[in-house]
Image (cartoon, helix red, strand yellow):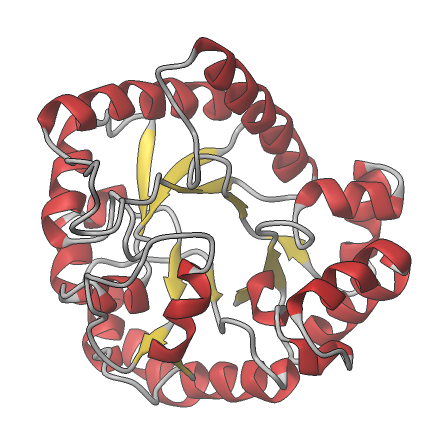
Amino acid sequence: MAVDLVTFFHPQFWSVDNVKQIIEVAEKSPDLFWNRMLDTVEAAGLTGIEPTFSPFNWQHALKTFGSVEKFSEALTRRGLTLASGFFADLEHGSDIADPATRVRVFDLARRYAEVIAACGGDAMVVGLPMRRTRGADQPLFVDLPYAQRLAEVLNELGAMTLRHGVRLALHTEAHSVFCTSRDVDLFMLLTDPLYVGFCPDAAHLLGSGADPVTVTTRHIDRLVVAHWKDATGVMPFDIPIDAGIHDSHQQYFCRLGAGRVDWPAWARMYRDHKISGWAVLELDAAADPLSEMIASRQFVETTLLPIID
């Protein structure tokens, strides 16, 4: 089991008052920042990490440790692997029709794929662009022409990362263009299965009104990696989609097993389709990440693994 590093995005863990101060800790004391995170993941009994957005990203890790090799050594000393990497650079403000933007995104993805492979991973999880707030003066319609343009980019990205041994997997982020069951079906249809895979996030699917097991089963042949995360219910579609959208999501997320995801059915899906590979736990901004990770790991080991095995 691995954990997405967004789990550590809570001020209490860093003994500060707000998110801005977390970023200040990361910049002023990068060694403390990364070593404390990695030590905590090791103490929780997990064996992998998924870097995410700044300052929990691969660029900050390399800046801190000095090289890919030294970052990989820091993981290996703790019995950890870079299980997968979250690529967030398409989520906000990316105009994929702009040639300069495409060059920048592809260069970032290529360098990230090289880091993932060098650290023992084989999956890049991609967050797709966010929708615009429903009722906005200039709405964004996720229709066939839009999806075809984006799918073309995703196919090219998948082909490029695969040259480095890294599979591309689309993440079901709530309020993005890839969150409802219809969205998943649309982009799975339009992307090439040889190059573009699937990363279902159980909480984000449920929060978007979908059944995580039904949607994932429908595209089980595309599954590369999954985010094992729980949610309390469906999120309103009218939440303002702005810089604070991810903060708005947090009130709907909860510890694994404490929400409404049907985890026994999820485990039976893994068993029936003989799915293996990384389960990436994701606990958005946990105030006490060590206890939350341990509780989630124990829930998987005692409740779900007996079903899968």
Residue 81 picture quarter = bottom right
Q: Nearer the viewer, residue 13 or 16?
A: 16
Q: Position of residue 111 (x, y in %)?
A: 64, 26
Q: Is residue 29 left or right of residue 15?
A: right
In this rendering, would 97 be left or right of 160?
left
Residue 58 percent coordinates (x, y): 68, 43
User: Residue at left 25%, top 43%?
Assistant: 177
Is residue 120 visible in the rendered structure shown here?
Answer: yes
Q: Residue furthest front?
A: 137
Q: Is residue 42 above or below residue 56?
A: below
In the image, residue 190 sits, relative to residue 75, either above or below, namely above
Measured along the vertical axis of the image, is residue 190 above or below residue 204?
above
The residue at the point 24 percent across, 68 percent down is 207
Residue 96 falls in which quadrant of the image? top left
Q: How many numbered marks appear?
A: 0
Q: Position of residue 79 (x, y in %)?
A: 73, 63
Residue at point 27%, 54% (across, down): 175
User: Where, by quadrant of the figure, is residue 269 drawn?
Assistant: bottom left
Where, quadrant-wise, is the C terminus in this rendering?
bottom left
Q: Nearer the viewer, residue 273 or 6?
A: 6
Q: Is residue 113 left or right of residue 91?
A: right
* Residue furthest out toward the top: 99
**Is 289 situated left or right of 181 in this image?**
right
> Does residue 43 show up?
no
Residue placed at 14% from the left, 67% from the top? 211
The percent position of residue 225, horizontal first and vertical second, equals 40, 52
